[in-house]
Structure formats: C-alpha cells, structure tokens
Image (cartoon, helix red, strand yellow):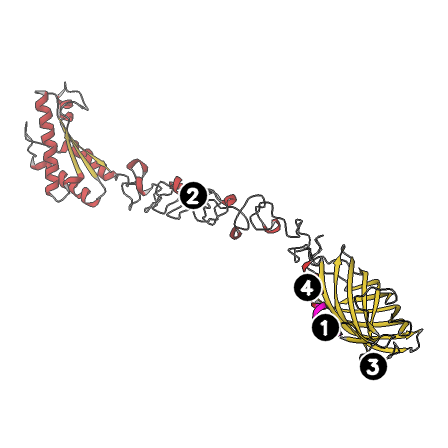
Amino acid sequence: MWTGVKSDGTTTFAAYSSNHLMKNILPSVLIALCLIFTDAKSQEMDNPWSVGAFGGITQYNGDLGVGFYKFQPKSNFVHFGFSTLYRIDTRFDFSSSISYGKWGYEEDALRSFEANQLQLSTGIRIRVFENDPYRINPYAHLGVGVAYLSGTDKPGTDIFFPFGVGAKARVNERLSIFFQETFAYTDHDNRDGEAKKDNDSFLMHSLGISWSLGKEKDTDGDGVKDKEDRCPDTPKGVKVDAKGCPSDRDKDGIADHIDQCPDEKGVPALQGCPDRDSDGVADRDDACPDAAGPASANKSVSGCPDKDSDGLTDSKDRCPDQKGTPELEGCPDQDTDGIADVDDKCPEVAGIRDNKGCPEVKEEVKQLFEQALQGIEFESGKDIIRRTSYPILDNVVKVMSENPAYLLEINGHTDNIGDKAFNMELSQKRADAVKNYIASKGIEAGRMASKGYGDTLPVADNKTTAGRTKNRRVEFKVKF
C-alpha cells in the first residue's frame, strides 16, 4: 500500500501498490480482451508500416498518492500523440510514439503538482494471435522512453519504462482502432516535489486509430487477397473461384486448368476424365466405355475387351481366344492361305476356298479317278472285284496315303437291267467292296464313305449297250 500524509498530520492509506496492480489488474484486463474477439481472416500487407494518432487520459502514481483508475478532477490530464508501427513478423511489432500532455496530482492545497510532458518512446508489441486471424487481436507491449517535464517546480528529463496491454480492432483493410493501457515508471522521484519511497510513475489510457501504408497481399495475383485466398500459389492466368482456388466446374477435385474433362467428374489418374468401366482408359478415348479392356493405339478398339490381344474386340472376334487377323475376323490362319483355321479343313496346308482350305485336287488324281470309272470291274451280278482292277485301286491307295487331308467318297452305280431293289443293293455292296479293299491296304476306314445309288443316276442312255456300260461304274470323289 502507498501512504500519504493529510494536512492535519494524520496518515492514510491512499491506494494500491504497483506490485498489487500488476498482479491483479493487468491479467484481468488481458483475459477480458481475449474473451471479446470476433472471427475474421488474417491480414498480411505488402508494406509492413502503419501510422496512427491517439489521445487519452494520463494518471499519476507516486509519493503524493495513487490516481490510477481514479477518474477525479485535477488527477486526470489529457494527452495526445502520434505513433508508427513496423510489423516484424507474424506476431511481433516494433512501435514508436511521440506524445504531449499534462500529468499531476492534488492531494490537498499544500500537496499537489502539475507538469507538461513531452515524451518519446519505442518498444515491442507482442500480439496474442499470429497474423491477426481475428478481427480483434489483444497484445502486450513493453519498451523504453524519454520524457521532458516542464511547467513545474522540478522540470527535467526522465527515462521511463512503459509496459502494458492493448487490443487492436480492424475496421477494414487499412483502418484499425486500438485501445491501450500503458504503465510507465520513471527513474526520478522528485518531479512531484516529494522524494520519499517510490519513484514517480504514470498510467496512460489511450484510444486511437492506425492506418496501414500497405495493401493486403495477393501473392498469386488472382484478384483474391491472401487473407481470403485458400490457394495463394495459383499459377498466373488460371481462373479461380471466390476462395482463390482454381475453378473446378465438375467438382471432382481436379482444377479446370489441368482437367482434360472439366465438365465431367473424373479421376486424377486420367487428368480428370471419367472411366465408367475402370479399365484405365478414359471414356472419351474408350471405344467400349462400359466393358473393361486394355488401351490400344488403335482408337477403334482402345478400351475394349480383347482376350487374345489381336486388336479385334471380343464382340467382333470370331475367335476371341486365338490371336488372329482383322481380315479373318480375328481368327488365325496357320497356313496363310487366306482361309481362317476355323473354316479350314486343312489348317496346316495351304489350299483353296473351293476345297475348304485344302489343296486343289491334283490333275493326276483327277485322271486316276476318271480311269477308275470304267476300270474297276466286278464279277457279273456280284460284288467281287476282278483282279484286273487291283492296279487302279492300288493307285487310289497311294493317293490317299500321300494326301492325308483327303476324304474319299465311293459311289456305286448300275444300269437299269434287272430289279431296281436288287440293283440298289448290288451298287451298295460293290461300293463297300471297294472301300474294304482300300482299307485293307492301310487307309483308315474313317476317311472313306461308301454309298450305292443303283440305277438312279445314269450318265448315259440305258437303251444302248455302250450307254449301259458307262452307267455300270464306281465313282471316286475327294472331300475335305
């Protein structure tokens, strides 16, 4: 407690000590300021300087008594001044100010003083929140100053040490209002005419305005200030939304300037294009967007199923499990005769289409079969082959052995002499007899077919001997 002596000689307790003030009042003020802030965005300027003007009331504290927070006449004096502020980093500011005003105190008619004060101070401000993330930002400050006192019995120059708390409220991009409490303890004890226990000190209640010399930053130049820009590094010239981020019309998380399909929601791997079948081929490049398939340089099949990877989609591939050629509808052609293996009766030997991919019947084979028409003879009315026919039949065996792709059709015919049913039966037996002979020489029976036609297919007139002779015949036809 501070003590004072009244005019009647009695002693009284005048006010709280400075230690009590710092211990109880300042923390309460700081907590109160923290509770009243409101939300706003951070403010970063391209010029860190700001200037301000302020005014307020100065109150005395010293050997005469305590006037702090006692708003009584002759104990409260007006001051005004100007300040500058330099933003050091996200939380610290360097400040300086010059002010002019009066301060003093009146205990009674005998114990009072009043002085003019011109002061210059500098110091550090420490903001509670980095980069002003809130519209109201409390701060603490401390520093050192020089004051010249005049108009008093004890004029002179004092060094003082200011400290305190304050709060700045942003009005707009440049204009702010601030309120500040500054406690200042000097290095002298006799400006008030009393040199006793405590040095002279004063408290300044200040209210002011500050004006920033810089503009709010827009680092990427997209027209959205950094304090509102969620994407401050947007490339130059890229269209942005209200939040400063590259526009994303389809809302797929891929910015329009790198989105190859800006109006369709897609995936990052395909530069923002959709892929309905998830085959890694964008729908716009996928010939089969609803069926998964591999990418291909051939745009007509890219993204389509192609199990055999022959460049022909499975839906158009006659042989989807065998690699083939487009000309043969996706089927292979081992013998390269232009006939797909699936249609080729002789897939390993080049042939002709008329023979279903098998080689054309050789001319000598045709001549042999022509010779056999009349060269194969039987015992009259029987199915017994005469020995004179064996050389021709042996040549047929040789042909069949040398041409494993051949299938042989053996047809028996008669003339019209005799009973038709008998002739039909006889022609079948003779055809079977020829087949059995050839089979006995090592040709698989499964490669041959025998059939009798009786007198139903004549090749000449049965009314003449010569005609009936031609009609009695065995025909050989090569099949594949």
Which x, y percent locates residue 124?
75, 71
Residue in the image at 49% along x and 46% along y: 275
Q: Which one is earlier in the sequence, the residue at label 1 or at label 3?
A: 1
Give how far across and how far down residue 405 sits, in percent: 23, 42
Give the position of the N terminus as an image quadrant. Answer: bottom right
Which numbered disc flags the more N-terminal residue, 1 or 4? 1
Dot 4: element: helix
Query: First in sequence: mark 4 or mark 3?
Result: 4
Q: Which mark is residue 20?
A: 1
Main structural element of the magenta stretch: helix, strand or loop? helix
The answer, for residue 235, to whether it is visible in the render is: yes
| Mark drawn on residue 196 | 3
Tag 1: amino acid: His
> Alpha-carbon distance for marks 1 and 2?
82 Å
N-terminal label among 2 and 4? 4
What amino acid type is highlighted by mark number 2? Ala
Q: Are marks 2 and 4 in contact (CB under 8 Å)?
A: no
